[in-house]
């Protein structure tokens, strides 16, 4: 038995994470890689999650809405920046398009909260905003899934 095999066997037996990593499927050349760990995308996830928490805590008229709107506008700008980065990379997956849509929709949903004339309309607008912010987190953190037809992961 060579030393390399002995060392590999010892590592496999001593660290279960090595065995788990070895069980992962082999990466496909050209397949998209998750961007969730990149600083810009991690920042978007953090900001969207924090804003969603704020929205879910509101009952009735949102407190300090101007500050919230500013933070939402910053998030929308970051989503657009992420879209442009993915576009520049030549990524032809769905993520770049989804981020652009979220960037545009955040401003629409925030305006709907601001324009709500009664509690029912405000509750609906807040619910839709919370859902969109949740989507913002999930589209970035969900690992690319294999395309059913090609067998390659999609973004």
Image: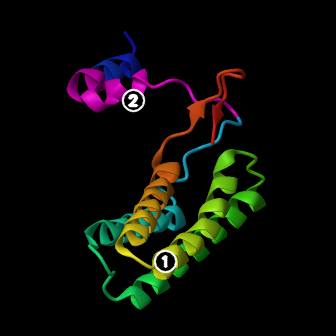
- Work out which quarter of the rendered image holds the C terminus and state it: top right
Main secondary structure of the magenta stretch: helix
Q: For mark 2, does the 10 Å Cα neighbourhood hold few (<14), some (14 to 19), or many (20 or more) residues?
A: few
Percent position of residue 90, x then y: 78, 53
Name the residue located 45 percent from the left edge and 79 percent from the top edge.
Answer: 117
Residue 126: which quarter of the image? bottom left
For the residues labelled 1 and 2, the Cα–Cα distance comes to: 38 Å
Q: Is residue 13 above or below residue 121?
A: above
- Work out which quarter of the rendered image holds the N terminus and state it: top left
User: Most extreme residue toward the top, as rendered?
Assistant: 1
Asked if the magenta segment contains residue 139, the reply would be no
Q: Secondary structure at mark 1?
A: helix
Residue 53: which quarter of the image? bottom left
Q: Nearer the viewer, residue 91 or 57?
A: 57
Disc number placed over residue 96 in the picture, else none: none
Percent position of residue 74, x then y: 53, 80
Name the residue located 31 percent from the left edge and 18 percent from the top edge.
Answer: 9
Percent position of residue 128, x then y: 46, 61
Q: Is residue 68 left or right of residue 74?
A: left
Asked if the magenta segment contains residue 24, the reply would be yes
Q: For mark 1, does the 10 Å Cα neighbourhood hold few (<14), some (14 to 19), or many (20 or more) residues?
A: many
Disc number placed over residue 72 in the picture, else none: 1
Percent position of residue 72, x then y: 49, 77
Q: Which residue is mark 2?
A: 21
Check if mark 1's residue and mark 2's residue have beta carbons within 8 Å: no
Q: Nearer the viewer, residue 151 or 20?
A: 151
**Magenta residue span:** 10-29
First-in-chain label (1 vs 2) = 2
């Amino acid at each position: 038995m060579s030393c390399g095999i002995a060392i590999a066997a010892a590592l496999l037996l001593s660290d279960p994470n090595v065995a788990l990593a070895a069980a992962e499927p082999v990466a496909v050349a050209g397949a998209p890689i998750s961007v969730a760990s990149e600083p810009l995308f991690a920042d978007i996830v953090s900001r969207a999650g924090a804003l969603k928490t704020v929205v879910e805590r509101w009952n009735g008229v949102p407190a300090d809405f101007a500050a919230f709107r500013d933070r939402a506008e910053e998030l929308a700008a970051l989503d657009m920046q992420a879209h442009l980065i993915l576009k520049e990379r030549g990524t032809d997956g769905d993520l770049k398009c989804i981020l652009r849509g979220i960037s545009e929709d955040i401003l629409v949903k925030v305006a709907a909260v601001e324009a709500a004339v009664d509690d029912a309309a405000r509750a609906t607008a807040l619910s839709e905003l919370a859902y969109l912010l949740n989507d913002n987190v999930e589209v970035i953190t969900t690992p690319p899934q294999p395309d059913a037809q090609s067998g390659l992961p999609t973004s």
